[in-house]
Image (spheres, rainbow, N blue to C red):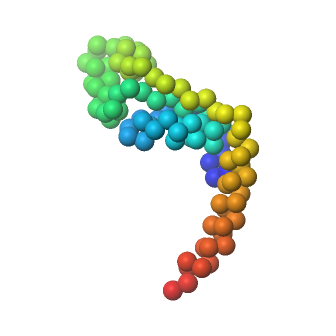
């Protein structure tokens, strides 16, 4: 599909934050399409949380960002990839075919 693993980067999972991460169906679709577990966090303001983690680490309250994350990030939910991923592969190919066919149509002035 359009998102493929890069051989030079090891990715073991996806962290989803913000408004879109509240939708369980979308999180499951992300996990299925990417073939990776998707983890969400309880906190709604992930940007503020991240800034606070760096600030507290810089102030010496934590020894590093990993410790800050462990201490400050609340409950998480993990969406594991479904074994039915091949459905998305065939749907993607249909989408790509239609997209290619329409490209010329929309390109005309």
User: Residue at position x 38%, y 19% from top?
Assistant: 74
Rendered location of residue 35, percent (x, y): 65, 37
Between residues 8 and 84, which one lies in front from this camera angle?
84
Rendered location of residue 30, percent (x, y): 57, 40
Confirm whether residue 6 shows in the render.
no
User: Residue at position x 29%, y 13% from top?
Assistant: 61
Question: In this image, 100 relative to 69: left or right?
Answer: right
Compared to residue 73, the image places residue 18 above or below, namely: below
Question: In this image, 20 relative to 105: left or right?
Answer: left
Q: How many marks?
A: 0
Question: In this image, 29 relative to 92: left or right?
Answer: left
Rendered location of residue 41, percent (x, y): 42, 27
Confirm whether residue 33 shows in the render.
yes
Between residues 57 and 109, which one lies in front from this camera angle?
109
Q: Farthest residue to the bottom: give it.
A: 109
Q: Farthest residue to the front: give it.
A: 25
User: Residue at position x 55%, y 84% from top?
Assistant: 108
Rendered location of residue 28, percent (x, y): 57, 36
Q: Could you say which quadrant of the image residue 107 lies in? A: bottom right
């Amino acid at each position: 599909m359009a998102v493929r693993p890069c051989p030079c980067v090891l990715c073991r999972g996806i962290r989803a934050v913000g408004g879109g991460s509240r939708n369980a169906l979308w999180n499951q679709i992300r996990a299925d399409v990417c073939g990776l577990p998707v983890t969400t966090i309880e906190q709604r303001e992930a940007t503020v949380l991240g800034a606070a983690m760096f600030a507290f680490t810089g102030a010496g309250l934590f020894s590093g960002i990993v410790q800050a994350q462990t201490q400050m990030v609340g409950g998480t939910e993990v969406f594991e990839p479904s074994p039915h991923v091949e459905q998305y592969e065939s749907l993607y190919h249909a989408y790509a075919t239609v997209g290619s066919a329409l490209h010329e149509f929309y390109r005309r002035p």
